[in-house]
Image (tube, coloured by chain):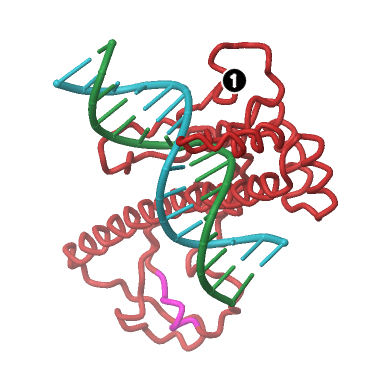
Chain colours: A red, B green, C cyan
Amino acid sequence: MGATSPSGLELTMAVPGLSSSSGSEGFGCNNSNGNGNNTVMRVDLDMNQPASGGEEEEFPMGSVEEDEEERGAGGPHRPKKLRLSKEQSRLLEESFRLNHTLTPKQKEALAVKLKLRPRQVEVWFQNRRARTKLKQTEMECEYLKRCFGSLTEENRRLQREVEELRAMRVAPPTVLTPHSRQPLPASALIMCPRCERVTAAPAARAARPPAAASPFHPRRPSAAF
DNA sequence: TAAGTCAACGAGTGCG
DNA sequence: CGCACTCGTTGACTTA
């Protein structure tokens, strides 16, 4: 899944170890659409293109002039929904990339340039901000779901390991404290899951500096998701 | 091929 | 003024 919508949403995730470009395989392991439909991002191409492919390409409808014309006609049917032309969308996207909000002057200038009402420009930016934020939230949600999944898995694995160790019921080896040379009680001992060596639990080694987060090894770089 | 479904999108409204 | 929420329209796609 690309992070681009038909209108070219550009998303940046504020999630560690993630960039929007990694989305193609990083997200969407489970299709949680609920209704069983595929979650393929459909691309609404050519929606601003006149169906006939005719010449009035630039600003098909919704321009200031046409809008007033439709209101004036006062027909029984409501005015057609505005679909921005490709060129209008492109220019709006371009200014959005530069600035996510517009000053009144910029709004006015853009409206003139696009032959739209300032209100339309304003609404476009508003919707664009909202939908960018929504996409971002969705991506973050996916990321957190994956985090949760892998942590759950690791938790299960560790619990199994604990059970296995308990099942072994081997007599705990005698470990002497480094200073007093007294044997440590079994409750003060833990086993390193990586090197499988028995060592004293952090509480029993209170004299050590707090720098090392893990009782076993220096902190390894966090796994990238 | 018509009808149904879905996502995208423009726009209205109320609130802080 | 920006935002959240919402609705109606539209076009692409699916299905019977």
Q: Residues within 10 Å of mark 1 (few under 14, many from 20)?
A: some
In this picture, is A93 found above or below A203? above
**x 83%, y 48%: residue:** A106
Residue toward you, A46 or A43: A46
**x 59%, y 11%: residue:** A53
A134 on left or right of A192? right
In this picture, is A32 found above or below A1? below
A201 on left or right of A140? left
In this picture, is A190 found above or below A205? above
Q: Quadrant of residue A74?
A: top right
In this picture, is A129 found above or below A33? below
Magenta residues (range) = A199-205
Q: Quadrant of residue A20?
A: top right
Residue toward you, C15 or A157: C15
B4 on left or right of A174? left
Residue A202 part of the magenta-drawn span: yes
Residue toward you, A161 or B6: B6
Per the image, the residue denoted by label 1 is A49
- Under mark 1, the amino acid is Gln
Residue toward you, C6 or A184: C6
A36 on left or right of A98? left
Element type at mark 1? loop
Residue A83: image location, x then y, percent: 58, 31
Residue A80 part of the magenta-drawn span: no
